[in-house]
Image: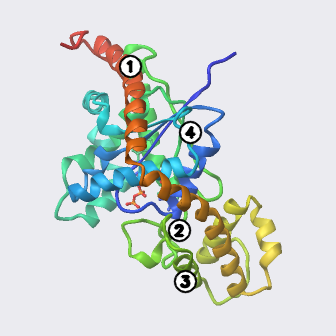
Amino acid sequence: MEPKKRIFSGIQPTGTLTLGNYIGALRNFKLLEDEYDCVYSIVDMHALTVRQNPTALRKACLTVMSLYLAVGLDPDKSLIYFQSHVPQHAELSWVLSCYTYMGELNRMTQFKDKSARNADNINAGLYTYPVLMAADILLYKADLVPIGADQKQHLELSRDVAERFNKVYGDVFVVPDAYIPKVGGRVMSLQEPTRKMSKSDPEDTYIAMLDEPSAIRKKLRRAVTDSENAIRFAPENKPGVSNLMSILSTLRGITLDEVASLYDGKGYGVFKDAVADAVIETLAPIQERFRRFNSDKAYLEEVMTHSARRAEAIAAKTMAKVRRKVGLAATRL
Ligand code: ATP
Ligand code: LTN
């Protein structure tokens, strides 16, 4: 039997995860779990690119880990660990930064956005962030990387760096493919539906995975739509309605056409309530499992330690090869 292909993905432990994180990434982590050999990281070192309160960061790491488990990821099948527990991420990141051009990093739109938002702290980590992401992926020789559409540019950079490195040193890295959902790859803000839903924006613009049902319904009822009163998928002209249609389509497993034929003519109130029902029904069992996992610190500790050990074994092998190829002393003291 062919060995399973490998998946790598990561989520930053910054603030609370949103419905965008769920639909764009986390949901697919679970859907792909049986078919692939999966490595899922809580990328805590990436979080340091913006100022964090240390206590809040530590707590957020456990929250994200509990959410990974709450969506149903099985730690016997998938590795679920903290990036900073495996030192090879930082090690490979340095090496790869010597194979990444400033011209490439200058083009990264997330860097431009985040620098605009954090004008008082445009640090070098924010700039080299995509190199660390490339290291994450390439260390595990991942074939596939489930991400939201906003990460496509970073994934392309990872591919370019891998190809560049391989051209010089032979086939060291696997060139990874992105897995971006066709519908739901970019869940939009509820208040400004031309921007992506982001946990760094005000509360009423996003649904948090841990929001109470009443808050979810309220936020969706207030979501910006338009005055046409037609349920039709047209992201350019009707971004608000199209966003809600995408959410309903992914969560209910029906096509956009089916959403339109089910709800067109019924009015936005009915439609928004249907979206709220789908979101609440999806998140309620996840929230219940979340509470159980999050209060069992011993179990979380066991999963993170066990996974980090196994992750490090894979990462150390890749790193040893990289060291050999580039001419660093072959063994670590
Ligand atoms: P921020 O909201 O602060 O920009 P983020 O949510 O983009 O941060 P992560 O938490 O690391 O950063 O994102 C984890 C995953 O969720 C990534 O794969 C990202 O592409 C995906 N994701 C984030 N926001 C959305 C969204 N609105 N729609 C779809 N996928 C998303
Ligand atoms: N940059 C990603 C998070 C991330 C990631 C990764 C995703 C860090 N390393 C490796 C996939 C694979 C983001 O969503 N902000």
Residue visible at 62% across and 24% down? 4
Q: Amino acid at mark 2?
A: Met
Which one is earlier in the sequence, the residue at label 2 or at label 4?
4
The disc placed on residue 188 is 2
The disc placed on residue 218 is 3
Q: CA distance from mark 4 to mark 3?
A: 33 Å
Q: Nearer the viewer, residue 139 or 129?
A: 139
Q: CA distance from mark 3 to mark 2?
A: 17 Å
**Residue 298 found in image quarter:** top left
Mark 2 lies within 8 Å of ligand 1 (Cβ measured): yes
Q: Nearer the viewer, residue 151 or 288?
A: 288
State the SS at label 1.
helix
Which one is earlier in the sequence, the residue at label 1 or at label 3?
3
Mark 4 lies within 8 Å of ligand 2 (Cβ measured): no
Q: CA distance from mark 1 to mark 2?
A: 37 Å
Q: Are marks 1 and 2 in contact (CB under 8 Å)?
A: no
Q: Nearer the viewer, residue 176 or 91?
A: 91
The quarter of the image that holds ligand 1 is: bottom left
Q: Amino acid at mark 4?
A: Asp
Q: Are marks 1 and 3 in contact (CB under 8 Å)?
A: no
Which one is earlier in the sequence, the residue at label 4 or at label 1?
4
**Where is residue 121 shown, x and y percent of the image?**
18, 59
**Where is residue 54 shown, x and y percent of the image?**
21, 55
Q: Amino acid at mark 3?
A: Lys
The disc placed on residue 318 is 1
State whether residue 149 appears in this view: yes
In the picture of the structure, the residue carrying the numbered disc 4 is 74
**Where is residue 5 shown, x and y percent of the image?**
59, 27
- Mark 4 surroundings within 10 Å by alpha-carbon count, few (fewer than 14), some (14 through 19), many (20 or more): some
Residue visible at 33% across and 20% down? 319
Q: Nearer the viewer, mark 3 or mark 2?
A: 3
State the SS at label 4.
loop
